[in-house]
Image (spheres, helix red, strand yellow):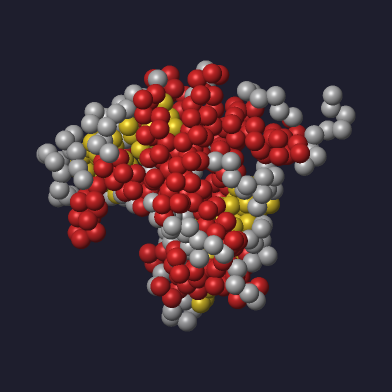
Amino acid sequence: MASMFTKARKRLKAAAQHLDIAPEVVEKLSYPKETLAVSLLVRMDDGSRKVFKAFRCRYDDSRGPTKGGIRYHPDVCMDEVMTLAFWMTFKCAVANLPYGGGKGGVKVDVHKLSNAELERLSRAYIKAFASFIGPDRDIPAPDMYTNGMVMGWMVDEYSSTVGYPAPAVITGKPIALGGSLGREDATGRGGYYVTRHLEKELGLAPGKSRVVVQGLGNVAFWFAKLMAEDGYTICGLSDSRGAIVDPDGMDPSAVAEHKRKTGRLDGAPTKGKARMMTNAELLTAECDLLVPAAMENQIVEENAKDVKAKVVLELANGPTTPAADTILNKKGVTVIPDILANAGGVTVSYFEWVQNKAGYYWGVDEVQRRLKEIMEPEGRLIHRLARDKGIDMRTAAYVHALDRIGKAVEAHGTKSFFAG
């Protein structure tokens, strides 16, 4: 079975077919610039010491310092980290940010750690990677099972290591440590801006279209909330244990509050007669817009043929496999790819970095205005490119990004002296 990274690189090759681009550029982008794997020896609360495998990948820095989150998960491995860094490279180019792509992770189940152990692990990560990251080299951020508190520990550890305050080394920080307003809802809001901006072309409309969102985390919640406020019917939401569906709709805020109080979705208030189902069943539920906003590899070859939505918005990273993509395209399903749909998060992370560098901070209205000014035009460009070239939106997004990255690579002098 092909690795996750091998599958991801197929996107690069598919995009290169639609551009007059130097072979050296494709060759350079086929491999990460540098990766580092370390063993973190962490003191546990009982006095014992335990080793955790940790990784960081800087995929490409042709357009600027690398940027990408740090995730804590039992399944983290180098292949996954390299793949996520690859996607980040193209995502930053899609949003026209002066960044390359990076990613990091620790192989750990955070539910088995105390708060003190989690802090020691996070600080150990920074100690190990202090020379690998930096405000102008590689800028981490939160990802799966990391948050502002973890980023606060990390920026504090880095600042202690270098001997001066360095808030720009990490984004997604608490506001008190230089975080940006508007970061909490940025990923979901970015997807919302793209969807609303292209809704006529996508055949969607408030008051008429039904939306199923796989997930109820931060990204899923904010997207669902914003769409519901605009009149879209949210007819499905889920967590890791299952999904709740009601064709008559539901209020995402009320469902989220029920989940907070009870720890479950069953019994959450909806507008009609709700029923529970699995996450797998949710992906093939009746709806107009399907939004996978949880894990990778959710829409696969085996279930793609049963997807009933006419539009898929990828708020998760890599939720659709290449084989599933082919099936969805043949069915006429429009897929708004992750490197466009969820670019709002890294865009506001960029805003945070800019504010840290300047020492001047914006209000939330300013952040949201600037986010909209990036997401809408880039979404429009990719939709137009897909239409003009007769290709799907994912390929168009990679073509759009590859064109920008390729020009940067060639400007660095990669193009052969003897070519033409």
Quarter residue 15 falls in: top right
Residue reaching furthest left?
A: 273
**Quarter of the figure that contains the C terminus:** top right
Q: Residue 148 versus residue 372: which sits nearer the camera?
A: 372
Using the image, determine if residue 30 lies above or below residue 82.
above
Residue reaching furthest bottom?
A: 47
Name the residue located 63 percent from the left edge and 34 percent from the top edge: 402
Q: Where is residue 330 in the image (x, y as percent from the top left)?
A: 43, 19
Q: Where is residue 190 in the image (x, y as percent from the top left)?
A: 43, 43
Q: Position of residue 363 (x, y in %)?
A: 44, 57
Left or right: 273 with respect to 108?
Answer: left
Residue reaching furthest right?
A: 418
Name the residue located 46 percent from the left edge and 51 percent from the top edge: 367
Can you see residue 140?
A: no
Quarter residue 111 falls in: bottom left
Name the residue located 17 percent from the left edge and 50 percent from the top edge: 268
Can you see residue 229?
A: yes
Using the image, determine if residue 415 lies above or below residue 215.
above
Name the residue located 43 percent from the left edge and 80 percent from the top edge: 46
Q: Position of residue 414 (x, y in %)?
A: 79, 38
Q: Residue 127 versus residue 409: which sits nearer the camera?
A: 409
Left or right: 41 with respect to 111?
Answer: right
All told, the count of numbered labels is 0
Quarter residue 278 falls in: top left
Q: Residue 389 versus residue 213: which sits nearer the camera?
A: 389
